[in-house]
Amino acid sequence: MDEDTLRDRADAWRRRAAETHDRREREANLLIAAHYAALADLMAARSRRALPGIED
């Protein structure tokens, strides 16, 4: 899975959370979204480090 796909999935889970009326389901959906977003952030950070000439 690439970074864009992970971000798209995070957005989809956020939308799903916004549509539900059940508090527990909303919280679970937001947690899933947060995990997808975190994976995308990790992937982005790793790819930045892998590029030559780029330092943090």
Image (cartoon, rainbow, N blue to C red):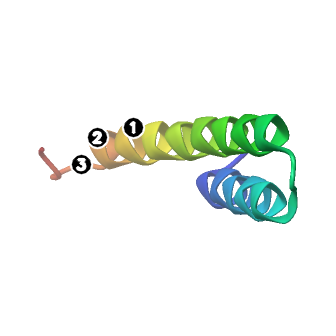
Q: Position of residue 38 (x, y in %)?
A: 51, 39
Marks 1 & 2, CB-CB < 8 Å contact: yes
Answer whether labels 3 and 1 touch (C-beta < 8 Å). Answer: no
Q: Nearer the viewer, mark 3 or mark 2?
A: 2
What whole-number distance in Å separates the C-alpha atoms at marks 3 and 2?
Answer: 8 Å
Residue at 56% of width from left, 37% of height from top?
39
Image quadrant assignment for residue 23: top right
Coordinates of residue 43 in the picture (x, y in percent): 49, 41
Q: Which of 16/37 is in front?
A: 16
- Give the residue number, with chain letter if any, for mark 2: 49
The residue that mark 1 highlights is: 46
Residue toward you, 7 or 24: 24
Kindly identify the residue that appears in the image at 32 percent across and 48 percent down.
48
Q: Secondary structure at mark 1?
A: helix
Residue type at numbered disc 3: Pro
Task: State yes or no: discs 3 and 2 in contact (Cβ < 8 Å).
Answer: no
Residue type pointed to by label 1: Arg
Q: Secondary structure at mark 2?
A: helix
Left or right? Give the position of 54 relative to 23.
left
Label 1, label 2: how far apart the Cα atoms are: 5 Å
User: Residue 36, percent across and down?
Assistant: 64, 42
Location of mark 3 (residue): 52
